[in-house]
Amino acid sequence: MESRRQKIMLVDDNMANLAIGKNMLREFYEVFPLPSGAKLFEVLEHVTPALILLDVMMPEMDGYEAIKRLKADPRWSDIPVIFLTSKNDERSELEGLSLGAIDYVAKPFSAPLLLKRIENQLLIAFQKKELQNYNDNLQQMVEVKTQQVVELQNAVISTVAELVEFRDNMTGGHVTRTQKYLKLLVDRLLAEGIYREEVSSWNLSFLLPSAQLHDVGKIAISDAILNKPGKLTPEEFEVMKRHTIIGVQAIEKISAKTEEHAFLRHAGIFAGTHHEKWDGTGYPNRIKGEDIPLEGRLMAIADVYDALISKRPYKVPLTTAEAERIIMEGRGTHFDPTLIDVFRQETPQFAQIAQEEG
């Protein structure tokens, strides 16, 4: 246990009881004899005791009122309180315990009995504090381990996404940029309460990193198609479109080998729906309007914008102004009109990301 010279406050309006109590306790504890409840709260502003011995029957502020004030103040609510009283009826004892007292000692009290009760209660308080410290440390350890797992997960995902990007012969940065575009859009939705119910249900620490896997299915597409310098034939384009289905299948295989996780659900939605169009002419499932998951509608804007400003084997990069114009023209056909209105507010930030990460 802690130092034997713990502080104890003894509160009693009877000066003789204060003297007797102090004599009983001073060999083992640092005792603060206090003649009233008012004096107790005055001293508490400067000293925090390990325990309070509190007389019940006092003028002006009795023990019941004093303990109510103690328990109502977070600075003192955890200080153990033992009631000292000449009242020994069951109703009085029950009332004191109900108000938060940890024990009830009748006057006149025996020194050995009082000392033993104090010792027991201080031991309980100490053990409670140690248990709380242990729980706090355990929680901190769990949080650290969880963060390490998340960081490892994100590192693996980032590496996979970079491998896909490398195979696609991109100039680099597509995954990073689309993730940042997506964050701009989501932050604006949250700020303005657009699609509030759905967006507020997302854990952004899962949502945003999972967007890195939106093109993971391209890892199964041949280099001849991925890096063809000219326009794809209809047959080649059909093969290319399968990267959405392959991506979903790959993520589903991972999901089958682990517990259900919001991260993987978001990743599967991004992979499978970012090429769907608002008017139903997209792929792979030709779904339309709000039947397209919101994640896919958001990623469609980020993905197309970045494709337009990026150099590809089959095209030169467009300017950010040209990309903005094309995105705006797709309002209500390719893209969700509500999201295009959000995008319009974020075009300067999109352009800045394109410049900084290009």
Image (tube, rainbow, N blue to C red):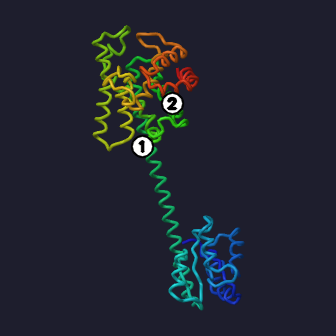
* Image quadrant in which you'd find residue 275: top left
Q: Which residue is pictured at 58% across the width and 81% down the height?
A: 83
Q: Tell me which corner region of the image, top left, top right, bottom left or bottom right, holds residue 192.
A: top right
Q: Is residue 325 left or right of residue 228?
A: right
Question: Residue 270 placed where, x, y %?
Answer: 38, 30
Q: Quadrant of the N terminus?
A: bottom right
- Mark closest to the chain's N terminus, 2 or 1: 1
Q: Position of residue 279 (x, y in %)?
A: 38, 22
Report whether residue 145 is seen. yes
Which residue is found at the position 54% from the left and 89% from the top? 88
Relative to 237, say whether 204 is above or below: below
Quarter of the image for residue 349 reads top right
Q: Residue flagged by tag 2: what amino acid is it? A: Leu
Q: Which numbered tag is attached to residue 20?
A: none
Q: CA distance from mark 2 to mark 1?
A: 27 Å
Q: Which residue is tagged 2?
A: 185
Q: Amino acid at mark 1?
A: Val
Residue 24 at what x, y percent from top left? 63, 86
Q: Would you name the residue on which mark 1 appears? A: 149
SS for callout 2 = helix
Neighbours of disc 2 within 10 Å: few (<14), some (14-19), many (20+): many
Viewer-nearest of discs 2 and 1: 2
The image position of residue 304, as x and y in percent, is 44, 20
Residue drawn at x 40%, y 38% as measured from the top left: 153
Considering every residue shown, the one lying at the far top of the view is: 230
Label 1 packing within 10 angstroms: few (<14), some (14-19), many (20+): few
